[in-house]
Amino acid sequence: MPVDPIQLTRKLVDIESTTYHEGPAGAFLHEYLEDQRYRVECMGVLQPDRSCTPGAGDGERFNVYAAMPGVTPDVVLSTHMDTVPPYFGSSEDDEFIYGRGSCDAKGIIAAQVAAADRLREAGVKVGLLFVVGEERDSAGAAVANLNPRGSKFLINGEPTDNRLALASKGALRCELRAKGRMAHSAYPELGESAIDKLVGALHDILAMPLPVEPEIGPSTLNIGLIEGGRAPNVIADKAEAHILIRLVGPADETKQNILRIVGDRADVEFSLELPFVRMRKVGNLPTMVAKFTTDIPSLTAWGEPFLLGPGSIHVAHTPDEKIAKKELLEAVDLYYDLATSLVS
C-alpha cells in the first residue's frame, strides 16, 4: 500500500520525541519500515550494540537506518526524529497539519518515506536514515558517520520551503563561566562580583565584528542564557552565559577573538562547533541559503550532501508550528526528482 505522508506525519507528531527522549519514535519507525519490507537496523547512541524493538523505552536513543535487503544505496534520504520542547500533539484542517515536529522534522520523515517507496519501485537504490539529537548536539549524526553504508549522495531534510539550499551556516556554541567572591552587598569592596565580570565580557563580545560572506550574509550572535548570583543582597560568586554564533566561515578567528576579549574575566568553553557548508545547484530547482545549522557537517561519510525539505523554518520551534499539506505532497515529488536526477 502506498505511503500516505499526511497520515504518517500525524502519527509521528503524536509520538513525543523531544531530544534525549527519541526512543518511542525510533521504535515506531523501526516497526513501520519493517512492515514496508525494508531491512531495518538500529545504531545505538549511548549503547552502540543495543538493539531497538517496538515498545522501546523513552530513555533509549538510537538512529534508524533502512534499505531493501542486500542493497547498497546510491542515495540516502535523512533527517532527525527529535524535536524541541514543549511537546504538543497533532491537529489538522483543510490546509495544514499542526503540532510539534510537524515541519521540523516529522513531516519531512513522512515525505522521505513516501518518496523512498516510489524510488525503490523505480529501481533506485535508496536508503533512509533517521537520527537523534540534531536539535542539541548532532550526537546521532556523529554515530551514523562512523557507520556509513556506501551511499554516493545524502539528501538531508530540514524546512527550506521546498527549495534546495546552496549553503547552510555553521554553529559555534560558547559557554562563559565567571568566578567571584561573596560579600554583603552593603560592602561591595569586600567581594568580587562574577556578574559584573560576565556582563562586561558580554558587552565587549556584542561589539565584536563577525565574519561576513558576500553571497551568504553575516554571521549572527545570540546570548541565549544568562544565570548567576545568590540573592540581591549578596555579591555574586558565580555567573555564566551561553552564546550561539551562526557562522559563515571558519571558526578559528572568531574563537581567538572571544578568548582575547574575555581575557581573565571568565573561563571560556567552546562546546559545539559545526562548520559552514556550501552545496551545489541541481537542475531548475529553486534555491535558498539556510541561516540555520544541520546534521550535514556530521554526516560527511554518507556522500555528497544536499539540503531540501517542506515547511518554513520561521514556524519551527514555535507554538504555531505547522506544515501545509500541499507542500508536504510536493516534497515527495521533489525528493523523487532530485534523487533520480542524481543517480541517473
Image (spheres, rainbow, N blue to C red):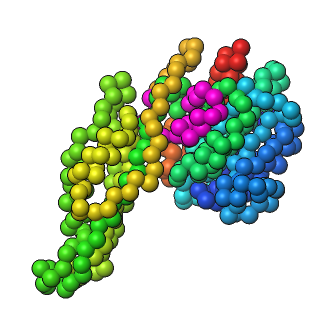
Tell me where residue 70 sits by quadrant. top right
Residue 14 image-quadrant placement: bottom right
Residue 99 in view here: no
Residue at the location (68% across, 22% down)? 339
**Residue placed at 70% from the left, 18% from the top?**
343
Image point 56% across, 36% down: which residue?
A: 296
From this view, report whether residue 27 is shown above or below residue 109. Answer: below
Residue 339 visible here = yes
Q: Is residue 339 above or below residue 156?
A: above
Quadrant that contains the N terminus:
top right
Q: State how many labels appear.
A: 0
**As rendered, which of 299 and 128 lies closer to the eye?**
299
Q: From the viewer's side, name the closer residue of 298 and 36.
A: 298
Magenta region, residue range: 289-309
Instruction: Identify whether 188 is placed above or below 315.
Output: below
The C terminus, quarter of image: top right
Judge whether residue 114 is colored magenta. Answer: no
Quarter of image, res 86: bottom right
Q: Position of residue 318 (x, y in %)?
A: 48, 50
Q: Is residue 69 left or right of residue 270?
A: right
244 displayed left or right of 36: left
Picture coordinates of residue 177, whole percent (x, y): 33, 65
Q: Position of residue 157 (x, y in %)?
A: 60, 35
Q: Position of residue 234 (x, y in %)?
A: 24, 82
Residue drawn at (47%, 31%) of the image:
277
